[in-house]
Amino acid sequence: MILGDIPADQSSALSGAVTTLDDMFRRAMMRHPDLPALIDPPNRDSFTDGVPRSMTYAQADAMISAIALRLRRLGLSTDTVVGIQLPNTIEQILTILGVLRAGMIAAPLPLLWRQADCIAALSRVGVKALITCGRVGNVDHSRLAMEVAAEIFPVRYVCGYGAETADGIVPLDDLFEQTDVPYTAAAVPERNGHAADHLALITWEVTSKGLVPVARSHREIVAAGLAVVLESPLAESSAILASLMPTSFCGFTVTLMPWLLNGGTLILHHPFDAAVMSAQIAQQHCALAVLPASLIPRLSEAGVLRDDHGLKSVLAVWRSPERLATAAPWRKTDIALTDVLGFGETALLAVRRNEEGRPGPIGHGPIMAPRDAPNAVQVAEIAVTARSTLAVRGPMVPRAAFPPGAERSNAPCLDMAADGYVDTGYPCRFDGAAWTTIVSGPPAGIVSVGGYRFVMRELQDLVARAGPMNTLAALPDTFAGHRLAGSAEDRAGMREALMTYGANPLIVRAFRERPDKPAAG
């Protein structure tokens, strides 16, 4: 492991991790500069511009420095917030690390966010630059970024990858040719305190009161990564297939942190194509696959998850942790499966399946990793609030609201108690006999659709704006958590209205034409 062994005699060893994410990448690069670091999806041209790339650690290191240097030469200062909206390609990983090397704060945006969501989120955090690309599917993301920037006064620059980007975009593709940029050229000026205590990442929590920015330091992110890696077996310098976007705290942790802690190769999969994924796992000899938990049964039945291809471990990521109780047993005894429960942007827990392949219990009080190991370390602490919701504190949990002073404003912010517990909003109960915590449902008023969370009341208000007879419902869905179903007399007009509002495509798709009704026109 890049950080070395965790001391066995430190009950709070995770809180002692004193390194930055850039330090971790640099250590891996210095150990094996010629090892492949990043590999693009082989079907990249089917969803975005550019040919698939593969980069060694040395090549990636030069590109990261080039990105950092360009940002600093634009006049952006230390701790500037940089919004990033890119598909699951190597540019996204390089850009995040480039922003961090420049001493700035990365704010990755969910790929399906459109103008309304982007403006609502970024206007809260003082963002000064956006980084995007040209095409993703049939959407011009460079134009989207320019439209967002026009509505947010502090934004000074919009940068982008791709041959065809909107006018006014600062191009970044030329940086791939700058292979001789030294690490020291992008060195960050000295800061007060330890570099690991400075903010690295901003993600957004969806709450009934609105979007809440959640900011984390390098130290907190490393602690979350260790909580996952300590519970899931992974040999050093392994190949890791990542199918989740690093745009949430959970997605960021399970994608970047096993790779940075392991020092291996990160193989990116733009979700989802089972045939492409199967080929990637076999050809790249992936030892670990990071997947949405809801898709694992189907991928297993389709023969994608096979130990004869070298697959040793799977991370099953639950964005709706209340659904773990209904999970089917894991029957592949030669492949270890670890459930990763994401409690919004507050915390995550990793629990390895037992010998019968059934989910392990969520503990109560101090949570240790690896469970039942003699050298286990505390990764979190769980409690049940007075209103019977799950609260978490510990080394991965943020210690303050963001931006500074948000707790004294009328804007929604992180719900933090004086004792450090953050209320996740998930209803739960404590089983004293088994000493476990049972999560019974999602936060009140929140629905989850394919990894995206929505406030149902806001969705219904948005739909009502387009006409009083229009309705929207959230229906249970085996794979996506919920499925949005809309009703409107003029479905085409409704879709056009929602796109004009800048709504998420998942909402627009709820009003697609019914199979038994021919599309208008």
Image (spheres, grey):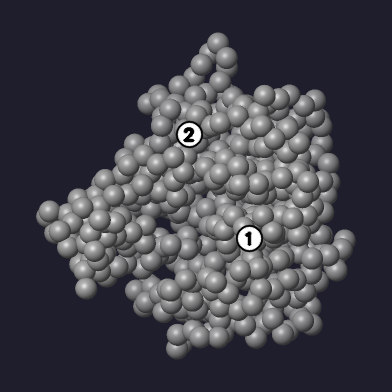
Determine if residue 41 is in view: yes
From the viewer's perspective, tell me whether residue 446 is left or right of residue 173.
Answer: left
From the viewer's perspective, tell me whether residue 343 is left or right of residue 39.
Answer: left
Q: Secondary structure at mark 1?
A: helix
Spatial separation of the CA atoms under disc 2 and disc 1: 28 Å
Q: Amino acid at mark 1?
A: Val
Q: Nearer the viewer, residue 501 or 185?
A: 501
Q: Residue reaching furthest top?
A: 433
Q: Nearer the viewer, residue 505 or 3?
A: 505
Mark 1 neighbour class, 10 Å CA radius: few under 14, some 14 to 19, many 20 or more: some
Q: Nearer the viewer, residue 459 or 159?
A: 459
Q: Residue reaching furthest left?
A: 468
Residue designated by label 2: 323
Q: Secondary structure at mark 2?
A: helix
Looking at the picture, how far across and down is residue 250, in whole percent?
56, 48
Q: Amino acid at mark 2?
A: Arg
Looking at the picture, how far across and down is residue 180, in whole percent?
79, 82
Q: Quadrant of residue 182?
A: bottom right
* Residue at point 34%, 36% (across, down): 444
